[in-house]
Image (spheres, rainbow, N blue to C red):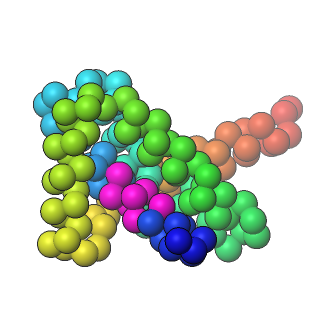
Amino acid sequence: MKFSDNLKAWARRIKRDGVTLWFAGKNPRTPWYAKALGVFVVAYALSPIDLIPDFIPVLGYLDDVLLLPVLIWLAIRLLPPGVLAECRSQAEEWMQANGARPSSRAGAILVVSLWVGSGVAAWLWFKPHP
């Protein structure tokens, strides 16, 4: 198997596991801590806005290539095996039926809030004090 095939398979699994977390967030058997992390990861992953914009050289893609897969892996590890299997099955069915990933307004709001909060904090930090 070629490197590009391995990379495509890995990307497909990451995408599937992101959708899996979406379904796990709705599952009543998902523990609260897994739900909390899963909701955060899904909101960020499905947000149309990145925390670090992609046009910033190198750093722009770090969240997509490193941060997001690590967070998805961690959230998946927190799911009980039965819930994981059920939600992965739902995710695969949903992806075959719909093709595209869902989107999240909450994720966009979260990212915009982080940027605004960071801007306000920086302004307060650097503004001249009388």
Q: Quadrant of residue 126?
A: top right
Residue 127 in picture, x, y percent from top left: 80, 42
> Bounds of the magenta span?
10-17
Foreground residue among 65 and 44 = 65
For image coordinates 22% across by 60% down, the residue present is 92
Q: Quadrant of residue 33?
A: top left
Asked whether residue 106 appears in the rendered view, the answer is: no
Q: Is residue 124 magenta?
A: no
Residue 40 in picture, x, y percent from top left: 40, 42
- In the image, is 41 to the left or to the right of 53? left
Where 54 sits versus 123, above or below? below
For image coordinates 26% across by 32% down, the residue present is 81
Foreground residue among 6 and 96 = 6
For image coordinates 37% across by 39% down, the residue present is 76
Q: Is residue 15 magenta?
A: yes
Residue 8 in picture, x, y percent from top left: 48, 71
Residue 89 in picture, x, y percent from top left: 18, 52
Instruction: Identify the main secondary structure in magenta.
Output: helix
Looking at the rendering, in which quadrant would you find the C terminus?
A: top right
- In the image, is 125 to the left or to the right of 25? right
Foreground residue among 44 and 118 = 44
